Image: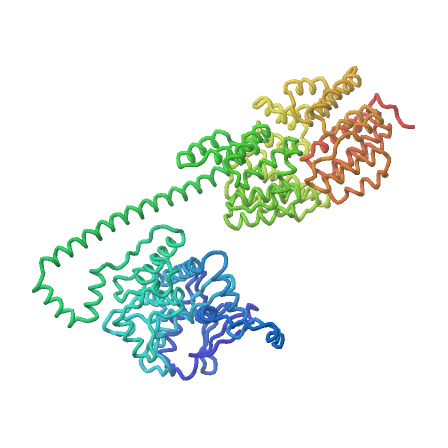
């Protein structure tokens, strides 16, 4: 028909396959016009398994059209390669002395190029050959079904018109050519339209049997037959022999040629190549569905031909002989035949009823499973929003659909985690991991909860194994990436990207935005902050009322605003803070939750509205009596110099973590006899809550005792090398082994670690009485805008005190 070139489309600078039709075809103006119409129709087909037609035209009398370039062979070449590999016999054994005179062994590649070999590999890898064949042919059947629904029939489906890419995608080629070549007066060499081996009976009997889309189903079935047996269903030395077999002879059953062919796959193939179009699959989509039922080991809809059906087929092929035999049967035993037919019919009806019931049961089970998966995905997002009432309702719904106890525990633990109720989260997620040992999502959230709860020694061994776990569900990818991203953002992003590629959800976007924010805070990257803003905006557009999504959206604006200020872009910072006010209002329903009040309080602090910050903290505490709201309230009061009131706020909530108890010591130091009380309290707290007991001692000016406490503090669990290295550097700086500049240089690449380092150096200088140096370091810690760090909050408190009173604290002598 022509020749195909690899070409480049200049206007779009892309490679294409360019087919130039042979002039010997005798294309008339009418045929050319019809071809263009057919090519236009094919060009409108948009399907993964149809090679798209980009354009068609005529140049100097040569008709051509451009298609997508598929870097792979046609299926007939792949079949030849498979047939050759199957028929190749091993060479006879040669003695060692004979082998010594031969040339070195070279793999025989004469039968195929690399592309064919790769494609053969894609058919044979990962799972059984027959499953892969079924999947690929199902994809092609879907593509044909799509074309048929658009009114386009191929008419020449055969292995040479199916292209197999190295990744295993099978694509239909040459839409539109077959119909053009059917027109009267066309001059063609060789075979007429449609390769005889793959033509349907109605194509051969032109005019006597109506030709419709079912001819493509027959040709695809013939191609499937050849993939299963590595030989075509109809063979012959001459073309007329092949055509006669297609019209009058049934092909040999595939299992007679290869016992490894599954019975259901054989049934599907034989139904597709039934000579009667009415007994074939009536749509290519129905054939695709049956192939996928076979792959998933469900009952198929096709049924093997029974004795009556085989008899009918035989009668239609040999009407004269059948008439004579029928007359003999009628004369000798009409009653017996009638009874036999009735028995067979009843058996077939019973089998059909049983099959229909089985198919209905399978469909109902698949429907329930799909509904459960969708409801669980929705429940994840509700749980991330932290609404316990809605989470309980979602749990009841998925329990009614058959959700396991482990899935329920996971959802409850997730809701607690995102509410920052870490003790509850740890309890629920530990049970979820026991009940769902293969769940990557449960394990990742448990690690994150351990870290938040200060149980790094439990998190470390789980974290080390997390990278080797293989996610299965979308949520596995998302939470694995989220957990890894909080230790090493670049390590977490690939899994998050894959989870979003599989299912682009607001939860996935919000989690990836949170990890981009970690990257922005650690690296001081404005680009990462802007990526977080983009993801958070998409999540907010998808689900505008979800509190977790709103929290991330506000957090992204706060981090970006800080980085814009550092980049000397005040207009952009003010715009973000002004827009963030809407998020603050939308987050008001979550003000009683730790994450909600923390972000709202920091927004008011960054905006300079300290009174609003205190009012928000008080509203939150009235709602929840939560530790974070008490912390925010006491911090605001401390900066206002209202120390007695601050201590009363803290006394209303018993803290189980370091942050609240550390703040309590700082507030207590400002009260009468505070230094003595802090010494007493810090010793008691150090045994239970303080990971860094030297911190309050530095505030008291007791540098030597603080150094002893820092030396005695064990290093953090080995999850993050930068964090471990920073801990070691702090100990060496405290002992005088390295200078201040060396300590700060060791953490300069990580802004969050730099914030902590400036806070500790500021405390050391304060303990020495060097208030000016202390003030400088507290300022630098605050300027990092690492609002997620409690050390940032403490730095802001001490900076405020030094700005109010240059001689603060009064219990430390002024350095002269």
In terms of depth relative to the viewer, which is nearer, 498 or 630?
498
Taking the spot 85% from the left edge, 32% from the top edge, the residue there is 772
In terms of depth relative to the viewer, which is nearer, 693 or 313?
313
Percent x, y for residue 736?
86, 35
Can you tell which quarter of the image residue 316 is in? Answer: bottom left
In this rendering, position of residue 664 left or right of residue 701: left
In this rendering, position of residue 689 left or right of residue 361: right
Percent x, y for residue 277?
27, 64
Identify the colour scheme used. Answer: rainbow
Please indicate, yes or no, whether residue 582 appears anywhere in the rendered image.
Answer: no
Can you tell which quarter of the image residue 335 is in? Answer: bottom left
Outermost residue toward the right? 816
Q: Quadrant of the N terminus?
A: bottom left
Outermost residue toward the top? 673
Please indicate, yes or no, whether residue 351 appears anywhere in the rendered image.
Answer: yes
In this rendering, position of residue 428 left or right of residue 399: right
In this rendering, position of residue 197 left or right of residue 804: left
In terms of depth relative to the viewer, which is nearer, 586 or 298?
298
Q: Quadrant of the C terminus?
A: top right
The mark total stands at 0
Up/down of 529 relative to 207, above or below: above
Can you tell which quarter of the image residue 652 is in? Answer: top right
In terms of depth relative to the viewer, which is nearer, 729 or 319?
319
Percent x, y for residue 250?
28, 68
Up/down of 643 relative to 208, above or below: above
Percent x, y for residue 499?
54, 47
């Amino acid at each position: 028909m022509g020749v195909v070139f690899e070409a480049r489309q200049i206007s779009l600078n892309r490679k294409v396959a360019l087919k130039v039709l042979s002039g010997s075809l005798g294309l008339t103006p009418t045929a050319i016009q019809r071809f263009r119409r057919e090519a236009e129709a094919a060009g409108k087909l948009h399907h993964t398994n149809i090679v798209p037609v980009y354009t068609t035209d005529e140049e100097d009398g040569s008709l051509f059209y451009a298609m997508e370039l598929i870097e792979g062979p046609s299926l007939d070449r792949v079949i030849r390669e498979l047939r050759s590999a199957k028929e190749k016999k091993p060479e006879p054994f040669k003695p060692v002395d004979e082998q010594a005179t031969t040339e070195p062994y070279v793999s025989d590649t004469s039968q195929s190029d690399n592309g064919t070999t790769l494609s053969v590999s894609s058919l044979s890898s990962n799972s059984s050959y027959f499953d892969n064949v079924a999947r690929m042919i199902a994809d092609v059947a879907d593509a044909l079904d799509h074309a048929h629904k658009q009114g386009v029939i191929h008419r020449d489906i055969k292995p040479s018109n199916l292209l197999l890419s190295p990744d295993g995608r099978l694509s239909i080629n040459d839409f539109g050519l077959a119909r053009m070549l059917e027109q009267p007066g066309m001059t063609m060499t060789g075979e007429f339209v449609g390769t005889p081996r793959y033509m349907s009976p109605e194509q051969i009997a032109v005019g006597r049997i109506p030709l419709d889309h079912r001819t493509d189903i027959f040709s695809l079935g013939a191609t499937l037959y050849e993939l299963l047996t590595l030989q075509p269903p109809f063979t012959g030395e001459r073309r007329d022999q092949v055509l006669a077999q297609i019209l009058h002879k049934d092909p040999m059953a595939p299992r007679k040629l290869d016992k490894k062919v599954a019975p259901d796959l054989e049934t599907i193939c034989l139904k597709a190549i039934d000579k009667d179009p009415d007994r074939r699959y009536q749509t290519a989509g129905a054939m695709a569905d049956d192939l996928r039922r076979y792959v998933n080991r469900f009952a198929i809809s096709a049924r093997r031909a029974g004795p009556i059906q085989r008899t009918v087929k035989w009668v239609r092929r040999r009407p004269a002989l059948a008439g004579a035999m029928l007359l003999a049967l009628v004369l000798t035993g009409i009653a017996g035949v009638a009874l036999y037919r009735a028995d067979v019919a009843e058996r077939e009806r019973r089998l059909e009823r049983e099959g229909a019931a089985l198919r209905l049961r399978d469909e109902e089970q698949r429907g329930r499973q799909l509904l459960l998966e969708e409801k669980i995905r929705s429940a994840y997002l509700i749980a991330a929003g932290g609404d316990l009432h809605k989470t309980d309702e979602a749990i009841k719904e998925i329990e009614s659909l058959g959700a396991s106890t482990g899935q329920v525990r996971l959802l409850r633990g997730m809701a607690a985690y995102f509410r920052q109720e870490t003790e509850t989260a740890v309890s629920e997620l530990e049970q979820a991991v026991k009940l769902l040992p293969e769940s990557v999502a449960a394990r990742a959230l448990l690690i994150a909860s351990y870290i938040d709860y200060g149980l790094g020694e439990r998190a470390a061994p789980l974290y080390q194994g997390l990278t080797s776990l293989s996610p299965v569900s979308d949520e596995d990818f998302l939470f694995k990436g989220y957990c890894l991203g909080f230790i090493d953002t670049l390590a977490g992003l690939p899994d998050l990207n894959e989870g979003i590629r599989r299912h682009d959800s607001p939860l996935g976007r919000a989690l990836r935005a949170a990890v981009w924010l970690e990257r922005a805070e650690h690296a001081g990257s404005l680009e990462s902050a802007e990526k977080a803003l983009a993801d958070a905006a998409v999540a907010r557009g998808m689900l505008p009322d979800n509190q977790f999504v709103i929290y991330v959206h506000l957090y992204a604006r706060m981090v970006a605003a800080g980085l814009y200020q550092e980049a000397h872009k005040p207009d952009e910072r003010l715009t973000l803070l002004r827009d963030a006010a809407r998020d603050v209002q939308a987050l008001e329903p979550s003000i009683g939750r730790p994450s909600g009040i923390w972000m709202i309080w920091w927004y008011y602090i960054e905006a300079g509205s300290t009174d609003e910050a205190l009012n928000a903290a008080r509203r939150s505490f009235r709602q929840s009596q939560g530790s974070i709201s008490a912390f925010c309230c006491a911090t605001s009061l401390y900066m206002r110099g209202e120390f007695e009131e601050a201590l009363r706020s803290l006394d209303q909530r018993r803290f189980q973590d370091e942050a609240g108890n550390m703040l309590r010591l700082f507030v207590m130091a400002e009260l009468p006899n505070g230094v003595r009380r802090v010494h007493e309290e810090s010793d008691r707290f150090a045994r239970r809550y303080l990971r860094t007991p030297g911190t309050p001692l530095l505030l008291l000016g007791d540098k030597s005792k603080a150094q002893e406490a820092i030396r005695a503090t064990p290093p953090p669990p080995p999850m993050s090398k930068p964090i471990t290295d920073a801990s070691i550097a702090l100990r060496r700086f405290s002992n005088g082994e390295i200078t201040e500049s060396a300590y700060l240089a060791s953490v300069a690449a990580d802004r969050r670690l730099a914030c902590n380092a400036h806070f500790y150096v500021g405390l050391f200088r304060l303990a020495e009485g060097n208030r000016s140096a202390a003030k400088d370091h507290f300022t630098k810690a605050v300027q990092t805008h690492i609002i997620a760090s409690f050390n940032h909050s403490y730095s802001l408190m001490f900076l405020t005190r030094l700005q109010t009173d240059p001689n603060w604290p009064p219990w430390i002598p002024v350095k002269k």
